[in-house]
Image (cartoon, rainbow, N blue to C red):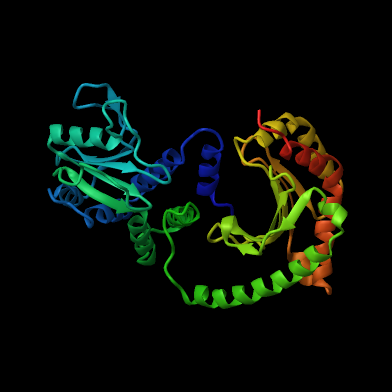
Amino acid sequence: MDNLLNTLVDYASAGCSRTEDPITEVLAWLLRADQELRLAFLGALVQRADREGRGRRLMAQGSFEVETQVVMCRARGLGVCRPDLVLSNRVAGEKVLVEIKVHADLTPTAHGGRTQLDDYLDIAEAQGNAIVYVLAPRRMVISGATNRPCFGGQVRWQSVYDAFRDVLARRKVDGVAALHVQQFLELMERKKMAVPPLSFEGALAVRAYTKFRDSLRACVDAVVSDLDPALTAGFGERSKWAEGRHGRMGYSLKTVNGGGFAFMGVYHGDEPGSDELPELYFFLEVPRGSPAQEALDEEAGALKTAIAKLNEGPGLIRYGYDLGGWETLWAVQGLSHVIAAADQPRAIGDFFTAALTAMRPEVIARFLNAAAAPER
């Protein structure tokens, strides 16, 4: 079954929408759906700091409302602001404001170097019944907030992850709710918001990975060294073997003029919990904002047509592009056929030879011309 929460966030992140907004909505949906999750979330906040005891009083009430993007008037009369998440109990008169961050830093306002957090703290002080938290993957540099009594403190997503995981382990949620919580945990892992605990399975996988990596490097080494030079014409010497960056293992080859580069190797994925096999990977890239990117964008129509034609024929290789984004063109093929092959280096060589041969006339040629574009 596909992870519906991942699908939601990917869809919302495809355009200009910030990742924080859909993740906030997913979190709020979970909190509204289950009392145990609400208490676990609030517990993750107040265990960090709760100098005024407001969060604990809210917990004691047991029931509270969960709202997102609540419009509030700035205490200094300078328009409105919108805290990401607000937990409130109208009977108790207590309120918790949470500023949620996934990748971005605090957003500056147009008023004297202040941030959105300053607005929320002003509101909390003016109302006298609220406390403000920042929820983020890492500790952020926040000036001026620490000494304000209405500032609850910074909380890492890891604390929320651990609290929700504990709720699941104690079987306090069942059925569909449990599935959604599990998917939210996977989403936090995938977005680098939190990490799972160490496990025996993971420890054993490290040893297996080391052996697999050595075998893979030996195969790719043999193949790249024996490739027909005509297939890599226009590129210089390959780099040293590199691994780990962006989930890749392999070699980079800069264009002769240095305006772009190619990569030959394997993409093993950098998404925790992925059960897909690694893929053989060849791609071309130019730096964003460079003259090469402008030249490549001018060729976008022809390149997209060429890629579409390559994907029309039968075969295991898939071709693609990300023009107007990461400025890449690529070819990929799963490793399953290599693992099953009697001659594994040859199977890898067949992929790179076929991919470069197919892409050379239209795709690689246009890429090399774009990479040679002069400064304008």
Asked if residue 123 shows in the view, the reply is yes
Vertical comparison of 12 with 161: above or below: above
Residue 81 in the image, given as x and y percentages of width and height? 30, 28
The N terminus is located in which quarter?
Answer: bottom right
Task: Name the image quarter holding residue 364.
Answer: top right
From the viewer's perspective, is 370 left or right of 71?
A: right
From the viewer's perspective, is 374 left or right of 1?
A: right
- How many discs appear? 0
Vertical comparison of 216 with 125: above or below: below
From the viewer's perspective, is 173 left or right of 375?
A: left
Residue 140 in the image, given as x and y percentages of width and height? 32, 48
Task: Name the image quarter holding residue 238.
Answer: bottom right
Asked if residue 269 shows in the view, the reply is no
Q: Residue at x 80, y 55 (%)?
A: 316
Q: Residue at x 29, y 46 (%)?
A: 134
Residue 189 in the image, given as x and y percentages of width and height? 47, 57
The C terminus is located in which quarter?
Answer: top right
Q: Residue at x 84, y 40 (%)?
A: 362
Q: Residue at x 54, y 52 (%)?
A: 3
Residue 133 in the image, given as x and y percentages of width and height? 26, 45
Q: Nearer the viewer, residue 61 or 152?
A: 152
Vertical comparison of 303 with 62: above or below: above
